[in-house]
Image (cartoon, rainbow, N blue to C red):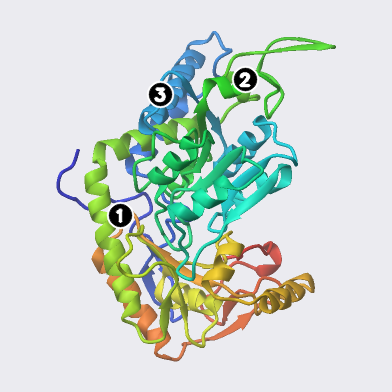
C-alpha cells in the first residue's frame, strides 16, 4: 500500500489538443465518471500479453494454454478485488449494463415479481428490471438522497420484493448511498441485493455482503471492453444461460443440450480475453495502491471541486449539501446558459473535457432540477419531434486517480470566466437533432459531425 499519495499518471495524460483560438493546450479530462483512460500497468500488461493471445479453454497449443491461464488469473484477481470466495463465481461480460441484463434474465423474473430499486439509478439499473418485472421505486429528496428508512419502507410493502437492485454511488451527483446499512436491512428481510458498483468500484471498496455485484473495466482504468457479474455459484447452476452457444455446453444433440458448470456456462462464445486481462490488472493495481490512499486523495479532490464550484456566482451544484461525503464528481448548472453550450465552450476554448446532458439517469436528473410534470411533458414532445435544443440537463465534472488540485483550479477558472459572461472567441451553432453546440470557424475540423452521430442522453 502507498501510504502517501504520489501523482499517478494515466495513458494519454499530457496530450495536446487544438482550441478554437488557434492555440494548442494540454487536454484535461474531467469525465472519469463516464470512462477512464488506462493505468500504465494495464496498458503494459496488455501489450505484453498480445503476442500470446489465443483461444482459451479449448486449445491444446502452448499459446492457448498461456492465454487460458492469463484469463483465469484475471478472474481470480477480480474475485479477490471484490472480496469474494469459492462459493461465488465471476462471469466476464462486456460491461455493467450487460451484467445487469444477464442477471435479470437468469433470475427468471416475471411480471408478478417485484424488484425494489430507486430513482437515483443509472438507466442500466432501471430498464432491465422494468422490462421483466414490476418495479417499486424509492424516491429521493430535493437534495438527491434517500435514507435507509426510505428503503426499509419500500421493502416492507406488499407484495414482498424478489430483489433489491441499487447503486453504491450516483454517477450524476457522486452521492455515496449508505449501502452497507441498506444491504443489512434487505438481508434482515431475506431479500437479496443486486449492487450496481460501476461508479463505486474504482473509488471505494465493494461491500462483500451484496449478493450480486456488477462493475465495468472502462470506469476503473481498464478500457478494453470487459465487465463482470459476480454472484453465488448456486444462482447459475440451474436453467438456461443468458447466452447460448459454444463453450457453454458439455453435450449438444439436435434435441438435447447439457450445459456445463458456471462460470463457463454463462460465457458462451469466444470471450474478450484481453479485456479480462486488463480488468484483472486494474483490480490488482488498485489493491496495490490501497484504499486509504485512494480515498484520501479523491476526498481532497471532491472537497476542492465542490467548494470551488459553490464559490462561483451563478453556478448551482446539484445533489447533496456540502457536509455530505461524495465521490469526486459534481453535476452543476450555470444560470442563463445551456448546459450543452457550457460543455462545448470548456472543450473548444479551454481543452477541458466534461460531460453534459442527463447522464443516462433521466428520472434522477428531473428531480435534481426540480422539473414539473408539465416541463417533462413538453420536453418529451420536443424530443419526439426530433428537436433536442431545449432538453434539460446539467454539466458534470469528475476527477480520479490522476487529477491534481492544480487541474481542478484550471477548470474552475475556465468555468468562472464562462459563468461571468466572458465573450466566446467564435460563434457556436446548436444542432437541433442532438442539442449540442459546435464552434463555427477556425480550428473546428476535429469537431464531430452531428450528422454522423446518434442522439441519446447527450451526443458529447
Report the residue at 37% width, 85% height from top: 417
The Cα–Cα distance between marks 1 and 2, rounded to whole angstroms, is 38 Å
Q: Is residue 272 above or below residue 412?
A: above
Q: Residues within 10 Å of mark 1 (few under 14, many from 20)?
A: some
Instruction: Say which residue label 3 marks.
Output: 76
Instruction: Say which residue label 2 marks.
Output: 265
Q: Nearer the viewer, residue 436 or 287?
A: 287
The Cα–Cα distance between marks 3 and 1, rounded to whole angstroms, is 26 Å
Q: State which tag comes first along the sequence, 1 or 2.
A: 2
Q: Is residue 427 above or below residue 47?
A: below
Question: Residue 27, position in %: x, y?
Answer: 38, 65
Q: Are marks 1 and 2 in contact (CB under 8 Å)?
A: no
Residue that extends furthest to the right in the rendered view of this protein: 255
Dividing the picture into quadrants, the one containing residue 365 is bottom right
Task: Tell me the quarter of the image containing the C terminus.
Answer: bottom right
Question: Residue 126, position in %: x, y?
Answer: 62, 51
Amino acid at each position: 500500500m502507498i501510504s502517501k499519495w504520489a501523482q499517478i499518471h494515466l495513458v494519454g495524460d499530457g496530450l495536446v489538443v487544438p482550441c478554437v483560438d488557434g492555440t494548442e493546450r494540454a487536454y484535461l479530462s474531467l469525465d472519469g465518471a463516464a470512462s477512464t483512460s488506462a493505468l500504465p500497468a494495464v496498458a503494459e500488461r496488455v501489450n505484453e500479453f498480445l503476442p500470446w493471445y489465443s483461444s482459451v479453454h479449448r486449445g491444446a497449443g502452448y499459446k492457448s494454454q498461456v492465454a487460458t491461464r492469463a484469463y483465469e488469473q484475471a478472474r481470480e484477481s477480480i474475485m479477490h478485488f471484490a472480496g469474494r470466495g469459492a462459493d461465488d463465481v465471476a462471469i466476464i461480460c462486456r460491461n455493467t449494463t450487460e451484467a445487469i441484463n444477464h442477471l435479470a434474465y437468469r433470475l427468471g423474473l416475471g411480471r408478478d415479481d417485484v424488484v425494489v430499486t430507486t430513482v437515483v439509478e443509472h438507466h442500466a439499473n432501471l430498464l432491465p428490471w422494468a422490462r421483466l418485472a414490476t418495479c417499486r421505486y424509492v424516491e429521493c429528496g430535493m437534495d438527491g438522497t434517500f435514507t435507509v428508512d426510505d428503503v426499509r419502507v419500500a421493502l416492507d410493502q406488499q407484495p414482498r420484493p424478489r430483489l433489491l437492485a441499487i447503486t453504491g454511488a450516483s454517477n450524476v451527483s457522486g452521492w455515496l448511498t449508505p449501502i452497507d446499512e441498506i444491504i443489512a436491512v434487505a438481508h434482515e428481510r431475506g431479500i437479496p441485493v443486486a449492487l450496481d458498483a460501476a461508479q463505486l468500484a474504482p473509488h471505494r471498496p465493494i461491500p462483500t455482503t451484496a449478493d450480486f455485484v456488477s462493475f465495468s473495466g472502462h470506469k476503473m482504468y481498464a478500457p478494453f471492453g470487459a465487465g463482470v457479474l459476480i454472484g453465488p455459484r448456486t444462482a447459475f447452476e440451474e436453467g438456461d444461460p443468458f447466452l447460448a452457444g459454444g463453450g457453454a455446453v458439455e453435450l449438444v444433440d439436435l434435441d438435447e443440450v447439457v450445459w456445463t458448470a458456471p462460470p463457463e456456462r454463462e460465457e458462451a462464445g469466444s470471450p474478450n480475453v484481453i479485456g479480462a486481462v486488463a480488468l484483472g490488472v486494474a483490480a490488482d493495481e488498485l489493491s496495490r495502491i490501497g484504499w486509504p490512499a485512494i480515498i484520501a486523495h479523491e476526498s481532497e479532490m471532491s472537497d476542492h471541486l465542490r467548494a470551488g464550484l459553490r464559490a462561483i456566482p451563478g453556478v448551482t451544484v446539484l445533489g447533496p449539501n456540502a457536509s455530505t461525503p461524495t465521490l469526486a464528481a459534481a453535476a452543476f448548472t450555470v444560470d442563463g446558459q445551456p448546459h450543452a453550450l457550457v460543455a462545448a465552450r470548456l472543450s473548444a476554448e479551454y481543452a477541458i473535457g466534461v460531460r453534459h446532458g442527463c447522464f443516462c439517469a433521466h428520472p434522477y436528473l428531473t428531480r435534481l432540477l426540480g422539473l414539473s410534470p408539465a416541463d417533462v411533458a413538453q420536453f418529451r414532445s420536443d424530443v419526439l419531434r426530433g428537436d433536442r435544443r431545449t432538453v434539460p440537463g446539467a454539466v458534470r465534472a469528475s476527477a480520479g486517480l490522476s487529477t491534481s488540485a492544480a487541474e481542478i483550479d484550471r477548470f474552475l477558472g475556465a468555468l468562472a470566466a464562462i459563468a461571468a459572461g466572458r465573450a466566446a472567441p467564435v460563434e457556436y451553432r446548436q444542432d437541433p437533432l442532438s442539442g449540442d453546440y459546435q464552434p463555427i470557424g477556425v480550428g473546428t475540423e476535429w469537431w464531430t459531425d452531428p450528422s454522423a452521430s446518434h442522439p441519446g442522453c447527450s451526443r458529447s
